[in-house]
Image (spheres, helix red, strand yellow):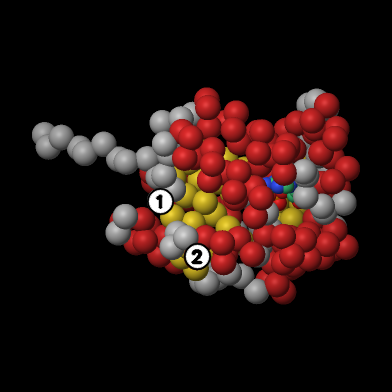
Amino acid sequence: MAKQKPQKPIRVIMLGAPGSGKGTISKKLLAAHGGNHVSTGDMLRQAVAAATPLGLDAKRFMDNGELVPDAVVNGLIAEWLDAHRSEGFIFDGYPRTVPQADALGAMLTQRGIKIDLVANLAVPNDVIIRRLTSRRSCSKCGQPFNLEFMPPRVAGVCDKCGGDLVQREDEKPDVVKKRLAVYEKQTKPLADYYAARKMLRNFASESSETTVAEIEAALAKK
Ligand code: AMP
């Protein structure tokens, strides 16, 4: 039997507004390549749920649609990199500011890690607002739903466990608008930052399948 060549771990930064599909696309790429989905939003939500001091501190920023201070998320990523030095990853939602990108650059250089690609997902604002404000999740088991694309069988009730469906505080319309404004001001400049370093590729397709195929093609050329 022909020996299979071991897959090289992928190291990707996924850029794009909240609701641009970073999570979905990251998971699809990782299903093919292996490696870790590293979402600072998920790490922070876990800290909030566990009511750690970091979580309690982060919650007031998150509920308001604001960014958690750079030092907090840089610390989470430094710890993560130390624990998973030789593994592949997709960073989803990090870096989010130019100072975070500078800090990440220094962390990667120190550890001899190279990024293959910064993928920027460009999705129109009206599509994003519709996607985010129609998300719901089960208050008991966390199962996600979307009132437009993946509605529950019975309105307001989880298909899996019968729990009540709730809207995340930061997916309510006013907070979504604030998060998009924060994105425009603090995160969008990262596209220029990585373009200047010749690391950026833009992906503008609305379908996640097409975007995944386009990212795969870009990675294959690395
Ligand atoms: P997300 O799920 O990535 O949209 O993140 C949800 C919230 O967590 C954001 O609105 C921020 O309050 C916070 N957050 C996540 N990642 C970062 C980051 N890299 N820098 C600062 N705040 C973050």
Q: Element under label 2? A: helix
Residue visible at 72% across and 60% down in the picture: 186
Measured as percent of width and height from the top left, residue 165 is found at 81, 47
Query: Which residue is depicted at the point 34% across and 61% down?
Result: 217
Looking at the picture, does residue 116 appear above or below residue 160? below
* 219 or 82: nearer the viewer: 82
Q: Residue at x 85, y 35 (%)?
A: 57
Q: Residue at x 80, y 25 (%)?
A: 52
| Residue nearer the viewer, 199 or 31 | 199
Residue topped by disc 1: 116
The residue type indicated by label 1 comes to Asp
Dot 1 or dot 2: first in sequence order is 1
User: Looking at this view, is 172 or 194 the one in front?
Assistant: 194
Q: Tell me if mark 2 has few (under 14), some (14-19) or many (20+) residues whose alpha carbon lies within 10 angstroms of its own.
A: few
The reply to whether residue 119 is visible in this rendering is no
Residue at label 2? 196
Amino acid type, callout 2: Ala
Q: Is residue 137 left or right of residue 91?
A: right
> How far across and down, in percent of the image, does residue 155 sit?
80, 54
**Which is closer to the viewer, label 1 or label 2?**
2
Q: Is residue 163 left or right of residue 9?
A: right
Ligand 1 within 8 Å of disc 2? The answer is no
Q: CA distance from mark 1 to mark 2?
A: 15 Å
In terms of image quadrants, where is residue 188? bottom right
